Image: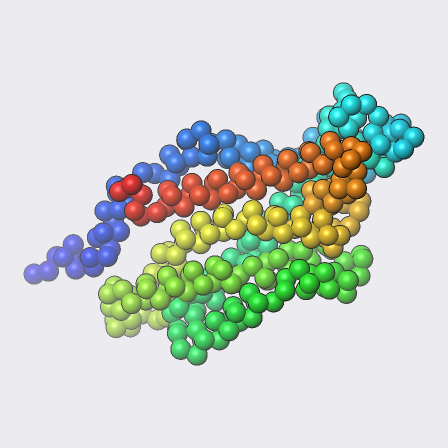
Amino acid sequence: MMTTSDALPVEAAVSLDDRTARTPVWRAFLRPVPAAAAVVVAASVLAAVFAPQLSALSDNDPFTYHPEALGPDTAPLGAFGGVSADHWFGVEPGTGRDLFSLVVHGARVSLLVGIASTLLATVIGVVLGIVAGAVGGFVEKLVEVATDVTLGFPFLIFAIALSALFPLEAPRALLLTLVIGVFGWPGIARVVAAETRVIVRQPYVVASRVMGARLAHVLRHQVLPNVASTVIVYSCISLPGRISAEATLSFLGVGVLPPTPSWGRSIGDAISWLLVDPAFLLFPAAALFLVTFSFNILGDTLRDALDPRGAQR
């Protein structure tokens, strides 16, 4: 008589062995570099959430002008962009707004747009990828055509044109999220579709279909759990690109509008003051670099930790 263990597919047994031998995921983040990256990411998220409280610590906000902190040429008074006990990162040239407040409030827009657009692109890509890989045929060809068209579309030109069409009072953060998210799904859709094509051909999936399991049941209970780790890793790795995309659009002047703080817009404004006051560029650029670099480190660490071959390395 065949026992339950004998009936298990070879693939399932190998998967169970790998999971048993694999080091727990959280241990991968105890190394110095991933731990430091996690601290930077956590600090940036907390700064975005508690931006008003952090600004209040220095008795400033990002919307108050401080002309007394500017010289006759509207450049910040004092060394290093006007850094002082009242203005920890100095002040913005031309307006005198507190730069520390601009940076912590700018994290709200950059992280919100980056995370929200990544979630949107992930949902679209996973749904289309799973459907294309599982159904195949005409549906798969249709998704492939949509993927090629989206990848071939000039993203920056479309974003600039769309920004010009929308009224100024339209919520720019929402517009950026939709544009970046809608154009960001092809990559993950291709990866998920390729994995789904392999999974639906596995013996245990074929057996489920033969025994009468519906396609929706197979996708929900057998396909989706098997592609979940890939989706998580891909989303973490693509998140820095989404944050940079928001910064790029704001840098070009088609992102959030003043006086709303944004790292990309602060960097764009700092270019014209680079020879007069380079400190204005330093803090927003450093914040953007540290956050995107840390997310990349976390994505790479998560990829290595979830790799089923990691135990053999």
- Of residues 149 and 303, the one drawn nearer to the viewer in this rendering: 149
Whole-percent x, y for residue 270 in the image: 76, 40
Residue 97 in view (yes/no): no
- Of residues 283 and 179, the one drawn nearer to the viewer in this rendering: 283
Q: Quadrant of the N terminus?
A: bottom left
Q: In this view, which residue lies farthest toward the left? A: 1
Residue 152 in view (yes/no): yes
Q: Is 82 placed left or right of 203 in the picture?
A: right
Whole-percent x, y for residue 209 in the image: 29, 71
Q: Quadrant of the C terminus?
A: top left
- Coloring scheme used: rainbow
Q: In this view, which residue lies farthest toward the top? A: 85
Q: Is 245 placed left or right of 10 in the picture?
A: right
Q: Is residue 275 above or below residue 309?
A: above
Whole-percent x, y for residue 167 in the image: 80, 61
Q: In this view, which residue lies farthest toward the front? A: 275
- Quadrant of residue 106 within the rendered picture: top right
- State the residue at coordinates (35%, 47%): 307
Q: In this view, which residue lies farthest toward the bottom? A: 138
Whole-percent x, y for residue 181 in the image: 59, 58
- Quadrant of residue 211 within the rendered picture: bottom left
Q: How many marks?
A: 0
Q: Is residue 4 above or below residue 77?
A: below
- State the residue at coordinates (80%, 57%): 169
Q: Is 282 placed left or right of 122 in the picture?
A: right
- State the residue at coordinates (46%, 32%): 33
- State the residue at coordinates (70%, 39%): 105
